[in-house]
Image (cartoon, grey):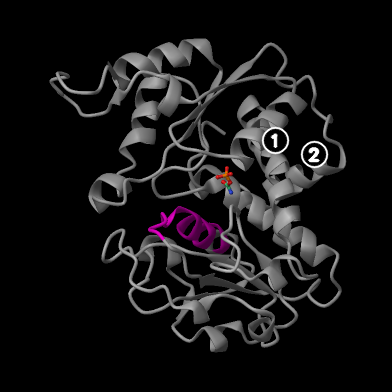
Amino acid sequence: MKQFISVNDVSDINALVKQALAYKAQPFLDKQLGANKRIGLLFLNPSLRTRLSTQVAAQNLGMEPIVFNVDKEGWALEFAEGAVMNGNTVEHIKDAAPVLGNYFDILCIRTFPGLVDKEIDYSEKIINQFIKYAGVPIVSLESATLHPLQSLTDLITIQESMASNLNIKNKKPKVVLTWAPHIKPIPQCVANSFSEWINAWGEANFVITHPEGYELSATYTKGATIQYNQDEALKEADFVYVKNWSSFNEYGKVLSTDKHWMLTNAKLALSNNAKVMHCLPVRRNVELSDEILDGPNSLVTQEASNRVWAAQAVLAKILGA
Ligand code: CP
């Protein structure tokens, strides 16, 4: 694997999931694979799970991780070609990325969208310039449009849950991605990426439900059933993935804060005793109710724990496992 930016960088999704679960069973299986190699984790935005799970994963493979909070500790980066840098930016990506590429064997980047200009965000100009100028494999720790380490984790968690649940072990599961309310505009990355991975996996009946106006880019959702009635969508669901996102069409806007879209036990009763997922962080009793998060159907802690194994499987592939 040369980079990990989207599901398109993965040749065999199920094999990658299997590798991740092998690391979960034996974390130090390949503890020499990354010996004498260094991985840089660059954060232009905040993180809890991604930064810590990727460090743990790298260390399990014998790599030395170094974290750099570019947004707080680095020079302000310029990304515009031909920029006259007489403003607030201090260093051009063309100059910074090759230096970072010389310091590290793998570079990982987290960069959120601005949610102002769809064209700029969906061009992935920041991560693409790291790919262009760094000269080493780039791993997305969430970019402007996608969060592939989260989506791989989600698929690991679904497959793990299916294997231990006789109700759904040998069936094609119904997976529902449901929009949830939030107080502020949130990127479409997790929803885009989850859709892309579930579609690419191809082993689920995939339904996406949201209020009208929250349609995601068809690039990622093509093939999924779109339902505007959440109750209908939840019927017979085996997995419910809860996530807020801002509007793609009216880019970055919050069009609804309708509380009725928050998942509750009453709504979950419509499902096939579905397991509930969320990438975290979650706003309790806004996006998801306490009763769900603290209840027996929640997979959120298991899901967040699985971030380590997803990252470990990806890094191992890049290291040549
Ligand atoms: N799910 C996720 O990416 O969490 P963090 O933002 O805390 O890394």
Residue 31 disc label: none
Is 149 covered by the magenta stretch?
no
Q: Give the residue drawn at x 31%, y 51%.
A: 115
For label 1, the crowd category at 10 Å Cα-Cα, with few meaning under 14, some 14 to 19 and many 20 or more, is many
**2 and 1 marks in contact (CB < 8 Å):** yes
In the image, is residue 188 part of the stretch drawn in magenta?
yes
Residue at 62% over, 60% down: 278
Q: Position of residue 124 (x, y in %)?
A: 34, 41
Q: Quadrant of the C terminus?
A: top right
- Determine the quadrant in which ligand 1 lies: top right
Does 154 appear above or below 80?
A: below
Residue 130 in the figure: left or right of residue 165? left
Residue in the picture at 74% in, 22% down: 33
Q: Residue 105, position in %: x, y?
A: 56, 17
Q: Position of residue 29 (x, y in %)?
A: 84, 31
Q: Between 298 and 82, which is closer to the camera in this rendering?
A: 298
Quadrant placement of the N terminus? top right
From the image, tell me which residue sits under label 1.
312
Query: Is the residue 285 above or below the residue 194 in the image?
Result: below
Crowd class of label 2 (few under 14; some 14 to 19; many from 20; radius 10 Å): many
Q: Which residue is mark 2?
A: 23
Amino acid on which the number 1 mark rests in the picture: Gln
Q: Is mark 1 within 8 Å of ligand 1?
A: no
Q: Residue at x 42, y 73 (%)?
A: 257
Look at the numbered disc 1 and give the secondary structure of its residue.
Answer: helix
Q: Position of residue 32 (x, y in %)?
A: 78, 19
Q: Which range of residues does the magenta coloring cover?
A: 184-198
Regarding residue 321, the answer to whether it shows in the image is no
Q: Examine the rendering and report whether any part of residue 52 can be seen.
A: yes
Sequence-wise first label, 2 or 1 = 2
Task: Report, in whole angstroms, how far the alpha carbon at label 2 lies from the one at label 1.
Answer: 7 Å
Secondary structure beneath dot 2 equals helix
